[in-house]
Amino acid sequence: MWEKTENLWIYYLRRKKMSEKDVLILAIESSCDETAASVVKNGRTILSNVISSQIALHTLYGGVVPEIASRKHIEKINQVVEEALAEANVTLDDLDAIGVTYGPGLVGALLVGVAEAKAISYAKKLPLVGVHHIEGHVSANYIEHPDLEPPFMCLIVSGGHTHLVIVKDYGEFEILGRTRDDAAGEAIDKCSKVMGLGYPGGPIIDKLARQGNPKAFTFSKPHIPDYNYSFSGLKTSFLYSLRDWLKEDPDFIEHHKNDLAASLEATIVDILMDKLRKAAKNLKINEVAVAGGVSANNGLRNSFREHAGKYGWNIYIPKFSFTTDNAAMIAITGYYKYLDNDFCTIDKPAYSRVTI
């Protein structure tokens, strides 16, 4: 009874604060290889969303080089923040709070964004809001679906994370399952690299898969209890199968790359959707969302639509432009933390690894 009363009181305070005036949040995201800044009004209206990507640079090395990422963030951070403010037609004096990704991510990259946010917060005496990167990805769905409210189930799938959670309230999650080893996005990137397709592997595999047969090849699927995931066995199965096929035909990859990509994608999507489907059925949940970089994959998006039609789900899929790292999703998350007075002190450090 007390918990229900307390939740209603929090809800009342939020709504009261929301009705008082417009709230402008400037957010900064620098957890990996994108330097981003965004200004969002009232948690749903994006006034600006500026991203400086480093993909072309890291492609030369076949993956993200942390030291290079950090240096590029230092070069771009002020420019990106200034551009975001100008595009939103606001100044630092118009802001109500500063949001920033505190982790998880590459610690050197995170430190650049956190230092920038702390400097603005200190200079302008603005509240500082620390945001969990994965929580930000969940919030990307609020951009495309302004009527979406918790509770709902969300599959968070990216290059570094694979989680199945219930979003009980803004900032409140119940973890149903997570990967025991590798993330789905990492498996895609590593298999793409083994095939010699380049970096980043996700878009390449996606493009090739549209022209291939998803049933051409069979790869190992894990048998993990509950709603947890595993992708290390799939990577090993793919590698060993490819090794054997290349012994018989040195040009096997070139001859079958479309079918390999389609079969790999189908296997990963099937693994993801199997646990999601079971959780939705067992917990009787019909509101289902997806978030993270891998949510840009067309095979996964199509599977979500098929499940919606078959099982009566109400699905929420972010726009392609909001599946990758961006600061708008951080600003939205920061807005609800602002309403709850969930601020952090100026001495709080960035963190590279943490569970949601």
Image (cartoon, rainbow, N blue to C red):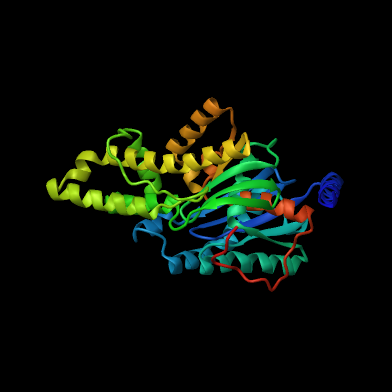
Residue 198 appears in the rendering: no
Percent x, y for residue 51?
Answer: 54, 52
Residue sticking out furthest to the left: 248
Please indicate whether residue 239 sits to the left or right of residue 131 in the image.
left
Q: In this view, does 287 lie above or below 31?
A: above
Q: In this view, does 64 lie above or below 293?
A: below
Quadrant including the C terminus: bottom right
Percent x, y for residue 141?
Answer: 61, 41
Residue 1 appears in the rendering: yes
Please indicate whether residue 333 sits to the left or right of residue 213 in the image.
right
Percent x, y for residue 142?
Answer: 65, 41
Residue shown at 45%/66% (left/top)? 66
Please indicate whether residue 109 sits to the left or right of residue 62 in the image.
right
Residue situated in front as seen by the camera: 203 or 317: 317
Residue sticking out furthest to the top: 309
Residue situated in front as seen by the camera: 222 or 152: 222
Q: Is residue 92 above or below residue 15?
A: below
Percent x, y for residue 239?
Answer: 27, 53
Residue situated in front as seen by the camera: 136 or 25: 136
Total numbered labels placed on residues in the image: 0
